[in-house]
Image (cartoon, rainbow, N blue to C red):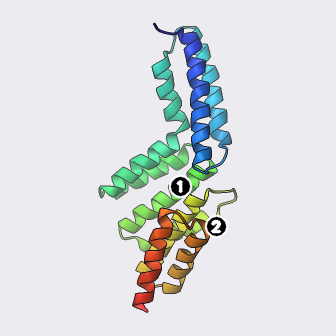
Amino acid sequence: MTGDPKLLVPALGLGYVAVFGLMFWVRREGFQVKFTIEGLVLTLIGTALAFYGLIGPILFLVVLYLVTMRTRVLADAGNYLSNNGHFREALLMFDLGEKMWPDAVGKFMLAIDRGVALFKMGAVKKAIETLEAALEQTSVAVPAKHLAACHYNLGIAYRRMGETEASRRHFLKVLDIDPDSIYAIGARTGLKKLSEQA
């Protein structure tokens, strides 16, 4: 038995906003205002289109996901390309993500991903500039895990440049911000290597 698409579309839209909103909260990313507004507006539009038989539930859900998660989809695509050595294409994905009106957290995530890609391609100085700029331009509450990721990658990049004090400072910042994260494990390893080098 299939449900009435006129009722299924708004139910899917509201359920989607609620489930992803809860996921953001569980992952300590806070309440995502932009995501919620976009999700509700798209649900209203989708409901109107479904009323006239112009969109089905599955297509609506796909469109809803791609629009509301566009920054994360592009960041994931860029990270996949970067991890496979396609750095130029990865940077294009991050550029596109920045042009798609990301929220502040999404913009910060894209900057971290860009910095990591630049580091991997050997542009360490540019990676440092990108990550430091991300920290300076952060005017909103960025989740601890993202701040920790940024400081961790700065610690790695400064260590590569031979700037041990800057590296140590960023590794210690990771431990202050999110001591139980995967980045904290890496920071402790980084601090140990710095001590061994000294």
Upstream in sequence: badge 1 or badge 2: 1
> Vertically, is 14 above or below 196?
above
Q: Identify the residue at horizontal 45%, vertical 45% (top origin).
A: 74
> Vertically, is 18 above or below 140?
above
- Distance, label 1 to label 2, CA atoms, is 14 Å
Using the image as rendered, state which of residue 77 and residue 101 is in the foreground. 77
Q: Quadrant of residue 124?
A: bottom left
Q: Residue under label 1, please give it.
A: 109
x%, y% of residue 180?
Answer: 54, 64
x%, y% of residue 62?
Answer: 47, 27
The amino acid at mark 1 is Met
SS class of the residue under badge 1?
helix
The amino acid at mark 2 is Glu
Q: Identify the residue at horizontal 65%, vertical 43% (top origin).
A: 32
x%, y% of residue 189?
Answer: 43, 76
In the rendered image, the quadrant that contains the C terminus is: bottom left
Q: Is residue 83 left or right of residue 113?
A: left
In the rendered image, the quadrant that contains the N terminus is: top left
> Vertically, is 194 above or below 173?
below
Q: Is residue 174 left or right of residue 74?
A: right
Q: Which mark is residue 136?
A: 2
SS class of the residue under badge 2?
helix
Judged from this view, the residue extending furthest toward the left is 84
